Image (cartoon, rainbow, N blue to C red):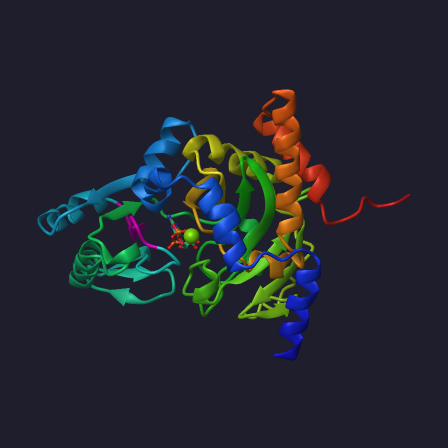
Amino acid sequence: MFGLWKTWKALEARGIMGINRRNADYVLKYNKRSLYPIVDDKIITKERAIKAGIHVPELYGVISTEKEIDKLDEIIAGRSDFVIKPAQGAGGDGIIVIADRFEGRYRTVSGKIISHEEIEHHISSILTGLYSLGGHRDRALIEYRVTPDQIFKSISYEGVPDIRIIVLMGYPVMAMLRLPTRQSGGKANLHQGAIGVGVDLATGLTLRGTWLNNIITKHPDTTNAVDGVQLPYWDGFMKLAAGCYELCGLGYIGVDMVLDQEKGPLILELNARPGLNIQIANDCGLTLRTHAVEARLEELKARGIEESVEDRVKFAQELFGHIPPVEG
Ligand SMILES: Nc1ncnc2c1ncn2[C@@H]1O[C@H](COP(=O)(O)OP(=O)(O)O)[C@@H](O)[C@H]1O
Ligand SMILES: [Mg+2]
């Protein structure tokens, strides 16, 4: 307990953002309520992304009513792997990742065998709103299963790691790699038991990690070091995340991306209330960085300038890099 307290105290001194400040000064200030559906509904996010030419996992089908559950066979015909998720879910709840079929049944990514009836029942639960924000009726979406790039093999246990970047008014401010563990059942959500690893914005090199509120340097399942790993396509991820501001119009978002073995970088989802644990993983508070972006915006406004995605990424990389350039 004392160790954690010390960590928070140290972060506070470096401008840690608490939940009240996040809500009042960022979420409420920069995120227009009327735009929330774009990020709170994964089907709408997908449609927007496709229109903007941004790659996402392919949508195989949508089930909106009990009656449409019969369509499932048709949607997954000829496919041995796919993902079912609630359109308005959060925190990894209600997501089933099917990796294979097995004698008329399905095998999840963590090896559990489930029947067709169980899947239908699960979809029915999604529709009633069991996993949706506020318990509202929801839709189920069936999509392409992402196969993670080989780079993650040694530092991830099953499932798909994702890369989260917090973006303020189109400027990336902090990044984290989230790694599934045995405990998280193939999902990369921290509260399911995944690890969060800080990422240097300038280089895409991983920093240390946080797991169940502890600071770690090794993956608990694979025992490999989680720090010092170079993420591929780093500048591409930064630009993808920065461009999500134009895509959704929300000023303060968490952009979740994955690296598929075949399709490359894809956007998984956008969050209008991104979590604050990213600060522990980066050993750094958000406030100093968000203030720097706000000061930049003021300055540009005075000069009547708006920056492009490339300029915004460059600004963030020059200012928010963790690792000083190597000497000599
Ligand atoms: N298409 C997919 N293929 C493989 N794994 C996925 C897929 N979609 C989601 N996941 C896994 O589930 C996690 C949560 O998915 P996400 O779409 O971000 O929903 P949530 O809003 O519940 O966080 C991801 O971080 C990833 O690990
Ligand atoms: Mg997510």
* Quadrant where the C terminus is found in the figure: top right
In reply to whether residue 295 is colored magenta, the answer given is no
In the picture, measured across the screen, residue 134 lies left or right of residue 161, that is left
Residue 151 visible in the picture: yes
Q: Residue furthest top?
A: 304
Quadrant into which the N terminus falls:
bottom right
Residue at x-position 69% and y-position 55%: 228
Residue 206 located left or right of residue 263: right
Q: In the rendering, at what x and y percent does residue 198 appear?
A: 62, 55
Total numbered circles: 0
Above or below: residue 126 compared with residue 5: above
Task: Please tell me which residue lies in front, 30 or 232.
Answer: 30
Where residue 58 sits, quadrant-wise, is top left
Image coords of residue 271 (percent x, y): 43, 47
Q: Which residues are magenta?
A: 79-89
Residue 246 is left or right of residue 310, and the answer is: left
Residue 21: image x %, image y %?
54, 54
Q: Is residue 204 above or below residue 170?
A: below
Instruction: State the residue at coordinates (31%, 38%).
Output: 44
Could you say which is closer to the camera, residue 146 or residue 299?
299
Furthest residue in direction right, as rendered:
328
Near-viewer residue (296 or 76): 296
In the rendered image, which quarter is residue 9 located in?
Answer: bottom right
Determine if residue 260 is in view.
no
Q: Residue at x 66, y 37 (%)?
A: 295
264, above or below 70, in the image:
above
Which percent across, then down, holds residue 19?
51, 59
Kindly give the residue lying farthest to the left in the view shown.
Answer: 67
